[in-house]
Image (cartoon, rainbow, N blue to C red):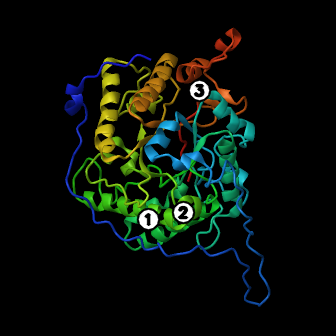
Amino acid sequence: MNKHLRNAAALTAALAVTLLTGCGKKAENPLKDVTAPAFTRTASKSGTEAEAQPVRKPAPVYGSGYRTDPAGNLSTADAVREMGIGISLGNTFECCGGKLSGSDVRTYETGWGSPRITQQMIEGYAAEGFGTLRIPAAWSNMMLPNNTIHPDYLARVHEVAGWALNAGMYVIINIDRDGGWWSDFADPAKKDACMQKYARIWQQISQEFAGEGGHVWFESLDSDGCWDEIWQRGKHLAGKEEAYALLGEINQCFVDTVRHAGSGNLRRHLLIAGYADDIAYTCDPLFVMPEDTQNRCAVSVHFETPLAFTQLEADTPQKQARSFWGTSDDRIDMQLRFDLLKDRFTPEGVPVIISNFGCTQMNKELDSVEDYLVSVCTEATERGFCPVLWDAAGGFYDRKKFRLYDRTLQEMLFGDSTETAEESDTRPQVTTARRRPKPVP
């Protein structure tokens, strides 16, 4: 694809970012020496043995294992470049809230419209050309006492990740959405309990995947890493340092907890969530990467600009939706934002993963959707970033036929379309799938 002409002189005008020097004081991880208790039987008040909690089976090892995985020998920057274009298994294991409840993983896996995930579905991602599968997960679903993740939930996510590993893909596993308890971090009376829960979750994920190698990444969280209760973004400066310091403390706890778990986690590549996963806020000097003795961390941001095109399906009283994308201003704005990321992190040796990009297809011109997605991938990979497409059932990838709906998009991204003339006439012009439906409370 031809490179778009850049207009570097427009950088300052196009991106007004509030920059403050300094950073919040990094707090010590209060749980670095905490170990995860085993599953045990408990006694009832009457002295009889109560019903046993589910017994956790030894974690299966997929892929080549952490000792022989060649990705473990790559620098994190080289691994990011090798990851290619990624895709998210969206609206699946991160489904939560509303009427979803119970002790069957399938309830959550299919709760927002996805069919049950199959090995053929995952292998189809790799066959289409995707090099990375991101698996968002709400680990509080089916959670047992003491913040213990139900072993069935861990095993099911591991099984799906294993299919991707066996297909030669990288896998990114995170905490996503997870029932909305993140706001409690902003409450001093609840913060310690939140940190305990957060560390406990990552202890268990780390144990589950301890046998996996460098093709398995962990991502500290999703875009929940922001607290308007502490700092109201864009309105005033009060509380800004405190909000950034809180995210820094959480990210440091994440790194320390994973490294403390040992085995394949000692040198695992880790993905550190930026502030609100927003490019401008993450490029602020108040955002600091956590300390890592292994120096194997990348930074995670989302890219959803312009919102009128990527998110709005119809006009609102506040904003007019856009059906098209691709003007010279659109391209310059994208390039400037990605240049901002590169200038902020590449000199520090910190690789970048665009862990979420995409757009709604409702009321959008198909050519604009294709142009936008391909442009994001082109601009990102040219700078050494890994772009990960947000997708859900009914979105871009057909989870029943195991391929992208749009064969032209597949060819534009990977140059390997096998579309027939008959299939080209059936490309969906519009889909009603939404990016991330909010569960009914």
Identify the image quadrant of residue 330.
top left
Judging depth in this view, the residue of 208 and 137 nearest the camera is 208
Residue identified by numbered label 3: 431
Q: Earlier in the sequence, mark 1 or mark 3?
A: 1
Identify the image quadrant of residue 405.
top right
**x, y (%) of residue 370?**
50, 21
**x, y (%) of residue 316?**
40, 32
At label 1, the amino acid type is Cys
Q: Residues within 10 Å of mark 2 (few under 14, many from 20)?
A: many
At label 2, the amino acid type is Trp
Residue depth check, mark 2 versus mark 3: number of the one nearer the observer:
2
Residue 349 appearing in the image = yes
**Quarter of the figure with the N terminus:** top left
Q: Earlier in the sequence, mark 2 or mark 3?
A: 2
Residues tagged 2 and 1 counted as in contact (Cβ below 8 A): yes
Q: With respect to residue 100, does 185 lie above or below?
A: below
Residue identified by numbered label 2: 202
> What secondary structure is marked by label 3?
loop
Residue identified by numbered label 1: 253
Residues tagged 1 and 3 counted as in contact (Cβ below 8 A): no
> What secondary structure is marked by label 1?
helix
